[in-house]
Amino acid sequence: MPRRPELPLDEEIQAWSKPVRPVEDLDAVARRYPDRQLSLSSKRKPLEIYDTPERPKAFSMDSLEFFFLIAQYFREALPLRLILLMIACQKAGGRIRLTQEEMATVLDVHRGKINEALGEVMSHGIVYKVRRGVYQFNPPYSYRVAEFIPGTELVEAGYVQVDQDKAIAKIRKDKSLPDLVRFPSLDHMREAIEELRKQRAEERAARRLAREQRQKEGSAQ
């Protein structure tokens, strides 16, 4: 049986008049045409997300760099717990509808502690207060793009979606907000972490020097 001619690599028009082999291995075709994007259509698999009937398909987009820095920066657990709670409770667009009393109840701490921790979190531009019982997450740090609304007898189920860039643009137009909210940056946290580590290294060196000095004095006696 005569060998079928190879598909021309550089003369695409001539390929229409040339018999070709059926595609049996997509990887082989991809290797022959490295500049082409090849794909096979398939049914998209559903996302596997742990949820509840009251909060179906509830998930957010979160900055890993944000998590990485706050894990190092906050020495106390409560600010971190509060940030996680607010991430979990945000609506599409990053709005958080929680009073301080509700935060205290969920986290099982005194309301005064919540007020203190919330003030620290807000001072870094992570969230800001819209009005009583309503806060807004800074979109570059954590953002819930869409929210599934379960259907009832009167309302059909569906998704509410708020694009992140629109939320950011709205925040930047509001000149009443602090610059750290309008133009978020975690550089101050990075600097504080480095300063703290430097300070701790100096303290460890001082303790080690003092311990060595005591050992020398003990040996001399």
Image (cartoon, helix red, strand yellow):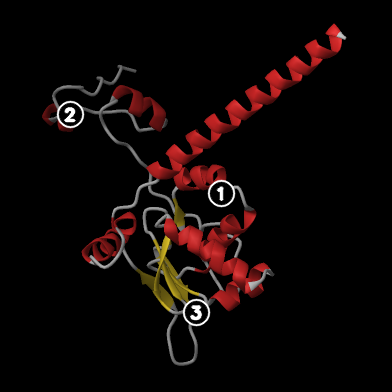
Which residue corresponds to the image point at 56% horizontal and 59% vertical from the top-left? Answer: 84
* Nearest-to-viewer mark from 1 and 2: 1
Judge from the rendering whether residue 160 lies leftward or rightward of residue 14; answer left or right.
right
- Residue 170 vertical placement versus 105 (above, below): above
Q: Residues within 10 Å of mark 2 (few under 14, many from 20)?
A: some
Identify the secondary structure beneath mark 2.
helix
The residue at which mark 1 appears reads as: 74
Using the rendered view, name the quadrant where residue 24 is placed: top left
User: Circles 3 and 2: CB distance less than 8 Å?
Assistant: no
The first of marks 3 and 1 along the sequence is 1
Q: Which residue is mark 3?
A: 150
The amino acid type found where label 2 is placed reads Ala
Q: Is residue 27 visible?
A: yes
Residue carrying label 2: 15
Mark 3 element type: loop
Question: Residue 191 appears at what percent x and percent y?
Answer: 43, 38
